[in-house]
Every structure is written in structure tokens, then in C-alpha cells.
Image (cartoon, coloured by chain):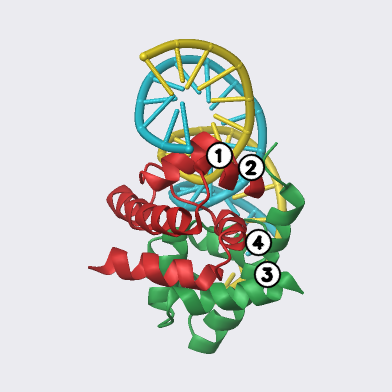
Chain colours: A red, B green, C yellow, D cyan
DNA sequence: ATGTAGACTATAGTCGACG
DNA sequence: ACGTCGACTATAGTCTACA
């Protein structure tokens, strides 16, 4: 068992919300974002719904396509997670 | 095949360097850091050597124990990755 | 205190199909 | 354009042991 799978879920949910807001603001569909990042459309969906947690390289490619710095996405997710 | 496994390696190496510097500066051993984060000592070693890539929740717990914000670690890794 | 190795379990990430 | 399901492959992360 990894450290705490409850924590992982909460992290995933925090990131998911941030991702969805950033994506909709940017006017991209999940499909378009996935295509640009070379990640699967259904996986973008899972990320946004907090069912999966991104690795660092996924964070990097998502942030690039959203015209955001990776640290800004992470900072937002961290803030959402902490509360 | 995931997006690009070459990119993943480079991300892992970038993060590994950042982690090692942050940890040695903080005066913690890999063992002590792993214990505090509830992640395996040998896995900390793999991360520092760029053999593995952290997930977001791993970044969160590492940064907490290093008294750093997650975004500062990510920003450094991103900078190292881009060059 | 760290690197490495092997065998393992859990989860990140892909893909095709359907509503 | 998105959610979901199932089956899959790749990799994150654990654990024991030895140098």
C-alpha cells in the first residue's frame, strides 16, 4: 500500500478542479487539449474528475498547452488541497 | 507507448537534481526524508538519480518535509528541464 | 548513508466502443 | 464534446537483501 491512498484521492480531486477551470477558460475541449499534449482524451476526463493523478511530465505538457507555467497550476492545486 | 518516454526521462532527471540539492541543503538523509514522507528510501534514491518520475502527491509530501512550497520545486525542475 | 537489483503491487496512461 | 466501462500496457512506488 502506498503512503495514503486517501491523500492521493484528495490531491487528484484538487488538481482536477484546477485543470478543468484552466481548460475551459482557455476555450479548449478535452479532446483538443489531449491531442495537443499527446495524452488520451479519456484520460483528460479522468484527471478533471479526480479519478487519476498526473505525473510531473503530464503536468508539464498540460501546462504548456494551457499557456500556464507548471508552477502556477501546482500552486493552485496545492491551495485547493490544503483546505 | 506513452506520449514520449524520452521526455519523461528528461523530466525525471531534471526533478532528480532539484530534489537532491533541496534535500542535501536541508541536511536530511534520503532515509530520514523517506521516513518523514512515508515513501521508500530506495525510491527517494531512484528519484534523485532520475530513474523515476514523481506523481503530484509525491511532490506535495516531499516539498512539505523539505520546507519548500511544491510550486518552487516544480518551477526549478521546469527550468532545468527546458534548457 | 547510498546504489543497485529483483520481484512484487498499485496506479498512471492507452485504446475501442457506446450512450 | 463528454462520461464511462473494460481490458490492456507502462510506470510509480514497496520491500528485502547485499555491497
| Mark carried by residue B14 | 3
Q: Which residue is mark 4?
A: B12
| Mark carried by residue A1 | none
What is the C-alpha distance between the residues marked 4 and 2?
Answer: 23 Å
The image shows residue B68 at horizontal and vertical percentages of 43, 82
Residue at image location 50% in from the left, 53% down from the top:
A27
Nearer-the-camera pick, B4 or C9: B4
Residue lying furthest left = A83
Label 4: element kind:
helix
Relative to A20, residue B49 above or below:
below
User: Of circles 3 and 2, which is in front?
Assistant: 2
The image shows residue B12 at horizontal and vertical percentages of 65, 61
Q: Chain of mark 4?
A: B
Q: Chain of mark 3?
A: B
User: Of circles 4 and 1, which is in front?
Assistant: 1
- Total tally of numbered discs in the picture: 4
Amino acid at each position: 500500500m502506498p503512503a495514503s491512498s486517501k491523500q492521493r484521492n484528495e490531491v487528484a480531486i484538487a488538481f482536477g478542479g484546477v485543470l478543468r477551470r484552466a481548460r475551459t477558460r482557455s476555450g479548449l475541449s478535452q479532446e483538443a487539449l489531449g491531442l495537443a499534449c499527446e495524452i488520451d482524451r479519456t484520460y483528460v476526463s479522468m484527471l478533471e474528475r479526480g479519478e487519476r493523478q498526473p505525473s510531473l511530465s503530464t503536468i508539464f505538457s498540460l501546462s504548456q498547452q494551457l499557456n500556464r507555467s507548471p508552477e502556477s497550476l501546482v500552486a493552485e492545486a496545492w491551495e485547493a488541497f490544503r483546505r
